[in-house]
């Protein structure tokens, strides 16, 4: 049950949401995102993030209902965050040409980099996994919530003892949309 799994979670930039059949229907505010690029003076840290705090190694998964009408660039996925300049995220995004891709972003010292994995076929639900083990991190996705495909393996060197990890959603466009957070497990 989603409600039991998220007992200790808290919001950064709480969005509009409601509980529907043991899932959260979340409507992100328009013009929200998580993206940092100090070299180009871009700083967006107003997306919505629903997280729990970890002090050591963990595995966290989240499952989202995919909204095929979501605007280009809109995202709902999984995020790990030390602060606004050091974080990672993974989600499904719709590109300008209407194709879909899994997007994995790692932000180190205020500079975001993006990896895209094009998908020819998407499911109506997507699961994401973030693993932390001895300072290394892994971002993965699954179309069936069983078989995970690794997208990024990386490190974010920081002096922070705590990492926040959880579901995130954002909408860089001006078009409204909603998505359902179906499951979070840790």
Image (tube, rainbow, N blue to C red):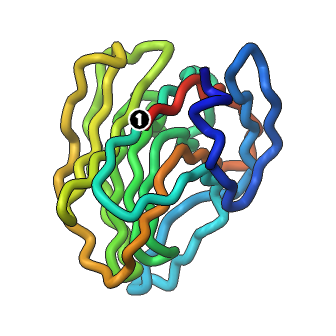
Where's the N terminus, which quadrant?
top right
Q: What element carries label 1?
A: strand
In the rendered image, residue 55, in percent from the top left (x then y), is placed at: 39, 64
In the rendered image, residue 84, in percent from the top left (x then y), is placed at: 51, 74
Q: Write down the quadrant of residue 178 in the picture.
A: top right
Q: Write down the quadrant of residue 116 in the picture.
A: top left
**Nearest the eye: 119 or 83:** 83
Tell me if residue 109 comes above or below residue 153 in the rendering.
below
Tell me if residue 125 comes above or below residue 89 in the rendering.
above
Where's the C terminus, which quadrant?
top left
- Packing grade of label 1 (10 A; few <14, some 14-19, many >=20) is many
In the rendered image, is residue 172 in sight? Answer: no
**Nearest the eye: 37 or 72:** 37
- Name the residue at 23% across, 19% down: 147
- Name the residue at 62% across, 26% down: 2
**Nearest the eye: 76 or 101:** 76
Q: Name the residue under label 1.
A: 61
Number of marks: 1
Tell me if residue 3 comes above or below residue 163 in the rendering.
above
Horizontally, residue 167 falls left or right of residue 152, namely right
- Name the residue at 56% across, 21% down: 65
In the rendered image, residue 109, in percent from the top left (x then y), is placed at: 35, 82
- Name the residue at 71% across, 29% down: 24
In the rendered image, is residue 32 in sight? Answer: yes
In the rendered image, residue 22, in percent from the top left (x then y), is placed at: 70, 19
């Amino acid at each position: 049950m989603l409600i039991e799994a998220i007992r200790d979670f808290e919001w950064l930039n709480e969005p509009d949401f409601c509980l529907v059949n043991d899932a959260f229907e979340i409507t992100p505010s328009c013009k929200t995102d998580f993206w940092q690029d100090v070299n180009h003076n871009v700083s967006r840290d107003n997306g919505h993030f629903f997280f729990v705090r970890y002090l050591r190694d963990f595995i966290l998964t989240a499952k989202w209902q995919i909204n095929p009408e979501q605007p280009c660039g809109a995202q709902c996925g999984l995020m790990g965050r030390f602060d606004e300049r050091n974080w990672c995220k993974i989600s499904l995004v719709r590109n300008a040409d209407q194709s879909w891709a899994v997007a994995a972003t790692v932000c180190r010292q205020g500079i975001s980099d993006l990896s895209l994995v094009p998908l020819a076929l998407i499911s109506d639900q997507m699961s994401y996994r973030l693993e932390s083990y001895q300072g290394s991190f892994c971002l993965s996705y699954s179309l069936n919530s069983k078989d995970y495909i690794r997208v990024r393996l990386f490190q974010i060197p920081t002096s922070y003892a705590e990492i926040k990890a959880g579901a995130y959603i954002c909408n860089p466009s001006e078009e409204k949309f909603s998505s359902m957070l179906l499951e979070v497990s840790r």
